[in-house]
Amino acid sequence: MRLTIITLLGILLLNSCSDKEVAIGKQINITVENNKVGAPVTLGIPFPKGELKSVDHLRLMTSDGVEIPCQTTEVANWGPLDDSIKWAWVFFFSEEGTEYTLEYGDNIIPIRSKEKIVSTNNMRPQGGIDVNTGPLSFAIHKMGNGFLDEVFLDSNGNGEFEETELIGSSQGENRGSFLDILDDAGIDKSKAVIHEVFREKGSGPMHNIFRIEGTYTYSRKDNNISPFTMWLHVYAGKSYVKVLHTLTYTGIPDKHKIVEGEHYNIATQDENILSEDTVEDIGWTQPNDEIAASGIQLKYHLSDNVNISIPMMEGSWQDDDAKLSLQEIKSNDNNVVRLLQQGPERVKSTSLRSLYVNGFKKDGNEEEKKDFNFEATISDGDENIAKSQRAKGWINIADTKRGVGVGIKNFLKEYPKGVQVDPITKSLTGSIWPLENGPMNFARHNTEPDGGMLANFAQGITKTTEFIYYFHDNVDTDEVGQKMDYVLDSPVAHASPEWYTNSKVYGNMAPKSTKHPEFENALQYRYDWWAYNQKHEPWYGMFNYGDGKSYFFNDRWVQWTNNEPTVDFMFWTNFMRTGDPKYFNLAQSMSRHTMDVDNVHWPKKRTYYGEINDAIDFWNFQKEPESTPYLGIGRRHANEHWYALLSAHVWIQGWIASYYISADHRALEVAKMTGDTYLNRIWGDHDLRGRRLYLSVLNLVELYDATKLDKYKKELDERVSLMLEFQERQGGNLLLDRYGYSQTYVAQGLYKYQQITGDEKVRKALLEHARWVRDVPPLNHEMESYLATIYPLVLGYEISGEKGYLDEALARAEYLKIGELKKSSDEYDNTKEYSADLLEISNLPNSKKKFTNWQTNQGLRVFGWTHAYNIPYLLYAMEQENME
């Protein structure tokens, strides 16, 4: 009997061991850069086709092998051919270590979080949301005031929220958030009205995301209503909230004489075309509707005697790691305490047109020179009590028991910014645009045509600002600072570069390596050059940060890039290839800038949801004004972001990457807005020819892949069919010779289309095109179009296996090879020396024209066609052939 029992125990033990072995799945190494203990982290990660069937079989472990709770979301799949996971989000709270293991497999069952968010979303007209994270409870009412209406902190830890635990509430008068407009009649203060509240994808027990849609209304009829959106991120067991607020400028930017009609280069008809000869109208340069102030405010419920803590950064504004000095202010009177960050005024720079006219001569072509006067000031009433060049970007206010901290991301880079405490009204205001800075005007600098037109398209610009609110039981300021940095200096999680490239989600590209520095450095040196100039020019400011300028000559930069050709995706690609968080931050800031500022967002008719039971609601909706036909189209590179529009000047590839990698919900929303405009075909057949067609295929294939919506697939199929039809009449060339630089749009767009649909006609078309550009190289834009053929040739090699295509790609890529830079980017003191060293190691030929826009000391616009979308794929092909 004893022997039988021992035998049975042995069998059970073996089965137990066997079960544990089965439960060990495949593993991915994850690194959290800039780690902060306890920080909320979302990892956007791709998977190869067929590798993962369900996000329910993912779990996360620390470097010690201890599993920690995580929340997983399927973001995209490999459909329509395969329903396996393509992109997933993994949310977790970071631990002390920076290294983690993501494990997956059919037998993997993750643990569940013990702490869970409880929330309700009542979409009725009188409804709203109520959220309980455990220590924090808050409500936002549709009939409320535009932000948090009541906030309770469970200070006694009894799991209930009592009246005495109220720590924040609205100020009333519909001023929870605001966008005030200034014109000749004075300031018109907005009132916030909330219409809808939704839960976003990625919401779960550990992390909820609410999207709040509302409108700012005004008392004067000449001021247009202005839509706003807020995303609230809340976390289980935490008493802090992340807020992303998007404003929309709907004013009339200047006082030029308004004439009915459309500009010829964006005309949707031919009967009413505007004259561009309005240079004598000085109204273009006179501001009309200006932003007086914008922000979010909350009434704090603390005792009268509070302590206010404000960290200031010592030394230069360029020093991101400067020492902090904490300013402590005892608020024993009624003085307003204010933190204000200011920077240089808008620069009146020379237009590219003037430079061409003057033959690129130095005299008379220089930008207006200004000192970079960055100043952060703390004031107590009328007295300035502390000054530095840069503030950290947060304030904490506390009594002896409880406190509230608020911080704003990119406080300097997106200047002006401010935070203020008013003890009379007990209000805590985070200023997106501080009243004390003076107004933001969108009038033109001059009446010189730019981008082929004399116009002002500022109306419809948006801007997203990121906040953190921390409600606490009077913790010390070090802990407050730590929580503030969860948003202000957030961690970045990533897998190894090899994991991203091996996933094939963006085709066959190689991770960064030291094997071919002559090519790899050609990429990295240019990205470093951009980052250097962003910081030293600087390319900062509320409506500038993220973007950069295109052309450098006579030691001056001109013309904002406005994302051509999908500059943000260059940075996302380089982040995946390197794992360097610097490129994550460059990519995220560029994606946010270009989806906000470089796109048309208004007038926009609201989306009909049908949450009201009465049928009359739909018929009322039908009568509402229609959207502008230009909704979702991009802005052309120009002297100012809002000076010019043009068809085929919007790039959503990077926005979709931002959605996948950084879980930016707004990115997909703006991408869909652009995609819907393609469906309208506002330019008739002009929209279905040339680079409009090529870029639309690249944009639509990314949008369809992210949404799997049939409406985008149908439009995409028709446009791909047209491209193949036109290839026949173009002798095998997929492009009109006029647009030789657009190779990357055609090659990337059709490659991805073939990858997700398996269409063999498209595969053959890409091979035929590779044969054409091999035998008839395009030179219509000199090196721009010639070097842009490298990737199509690499695809010819990939599809056919014929090494001749790769040999030709390598022959053309000889121009891309670069020498070794004398010193690293951070060792240069000025752009002039840096530029000279970049030119010295260049192997690129100069243009036959006045100016070479593809040289190594230029921006990233032409670089996309010549380098960024060629080299990663070329390096992969070289690895396949074991080329050392």
Image (cartoon, grey):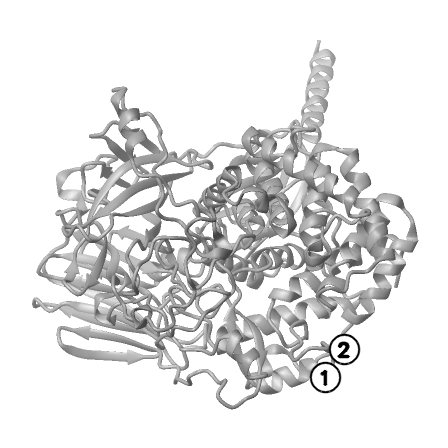
Q: Is residue 351 above or below residue 706?
A: below
Residue indicated by mark 2: 819
Q: Are marks 2 and 1 in contact (CB under 8 Å)?
A: yes
Q: Amino acid at mark 2?
A: Gly
> Which is more toward the observer, 743 or 417?
743
> Which is more toward the observer, 815 or 15?
815
Q: Is residue 753 above or below residue 789?
A: above
Which quadrant holds residue 726? top right
Q: Position of residue 86 (x, y in %)?
A: 63, 37
Q: Nearer the viewer, mark 2 or mark 1?
A: 1
Residue indicated by mark 1: 840
Residue for point 76% across, 77% down:
819
Q: From the viewer's perspective, is 237 left or right of 658? A: left
- Would you call the spot at circle 1 few (<14 residues within 10 Å), some (14-19), or many (20 or more)? some
Q: Name the residue at the front extreme.
A: 271
Q: Name the residue at the top extreme.
A: 1
Q: Could you tell me if residue 398 is visible in this image?
A: yes
Q: From the viewer's perspective, is 592 left or right of 307? A: right
